[in-house]
Image: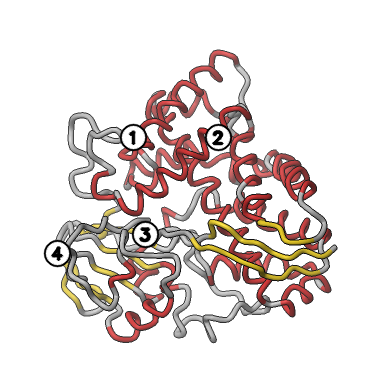
Amino acid sequence: MPSSAATSGAVEHPWHGVRAGAFRGAVDTYALHDEMRRLAPVWQAPWGDVYVTGYDLVSGSLGDRRLSHVPPGSDASGPGSAIRDWLIYQEGAAHAALRQALRQPFVGKGMAALRPVVAQAVEECVGAAALSGPVDVVAAFTRAIPERVIGRLLGVPDEDMPLMRAWSVAVRTMLDTGFDDAFDGGANPADEMSGYFVEHLRHLLAAGRLPPLLTGLPAVVDALGLTAAGRNIAFLAFAGHETTVHLIGNMLFHLAHQPDQWSALRADRRLVANAVAETLRLESPVQKICRWPLEPVVLGGRQIARDQMVVLLVGAANRDPAQFADPSRFDLRRAARQNLAFGRGAHVCIGRALAEMEGNAVLEAALARWKTIAPVAWQWLDNSSIRGLDALTLRLAA
């Protein structure tokens, strides 16, 4: 997901804005992506990382077994960050076993148990929002709904949710600007969050009361051990809501700026799923996914050394005009094509169906409640790896 951290005295470059730590929310990151894709679709930056922008190159790299998901040295013996055990930084047999242990609630009949939890959170939060006037929808519900959903699905007490929010913000920042140090033995917010969940799982097992996402907890702990299980439930707690927060906010941002699209949705609710998919393409919440070559490789005609960080710019790939016509336009009726917002292949996001369910439910509720929504003010996150809004004030009219 992240790129390496910026350091003081870095060499300035016209494309420096794609670098973690140099990014600012006001930067037109997509203009940089367009220029990079046109002039150097595989670009080695002065600070050493390699950036990949074209859809075919990013898509192919996501499934390329020569590119490791595991940062060099992160499997070293001795103490290390809890992040080392996260699902997204595993591969091969270890990844397959871990994914199998965690995936059951997200597939088939398992999703039916999640739907009432989503519906309740949407009703509570959207129902409490003002019927008219300016409302910061991020503060009102786009963040609160995914937080409540993941908290309740994991059995986190309501009084502990402020801890979850603080840890998630800290982990989000660390994975962007502190990634180079995230795997070492130093204390970090992911370790604190993981420690909480290790104890949380211990308590749930002792009490015998298992929430919807953890009905298979005994088997998960048997397969992984309590520590690795706790670390990966912490990962689910973070990833299972953080990207959904930004999916919902980004979707409302674009619909507010295009009243004709909002009207089309009100006229035909069958377009709701299209709106979610188009938001994921146009404003991919996860903008970057990193890989490390296991051997020297050639990508797009450029030689890349073993262990060199390759930053796959998902946000750029999903706006590639070779794949998507008029790619900067939000279009509810766009012909369905695979976007890469959730990755692809063996590492495709395990919680994709839940995120889409939440996006659909929030949009259905908003359409039922407000006739019009219009933009007033907004503030993008200062984060190069996650695309989302810190604040989004809309003028709502019932």
Q: CA distance from mark 2 to mark 4?
A: 43 Å
What's the distance in space between the residues labelled 4 and 3, CA to CA? Answer: 18 Å
From the viewer's perspective, tell me whether residue 309 is left or right of residue 234: left
Q: Where does residue 355 sit, x and y in percent of width and height?
A: 60, 52
Residue bearing mark 4 = 305
Above or below — where is 300 with respect to 121? below
The local crowd at label 3, few if under 14, some if 14 to 19, many if 20 or more residues have their Cα within 10 Å, is many
Percent x, y for residue 272?
Answer: 72, 66
Mark 3 secondary-structure assignment: strand
Residue at image x 38%, y 77%? Answer: 33
- Residue located beneath label 3 in the image: 289
For the point 33% across and 68% down, the residue is 18
Identify the mark nearer the N-term, 2 or 4: 2
Name the amino acid type tagged 4.
Ala
The residue at which mark 1 appears reads as 82
**Regarding mark 1 in the picture, which secondary structure is present there?**
helix
Q: Which residue is mark 2?
A: 162
Where does the image place residue 300, in percent across and percent down from the top left? 26, 78
User: What amino acid type should be assigned to the residue bearing mark 3?
Assistant: Ile
Rate crowding at label 1 as few (under 14), some (14 to 19) or many (20 or more) other CA atoms within 10 Å. many
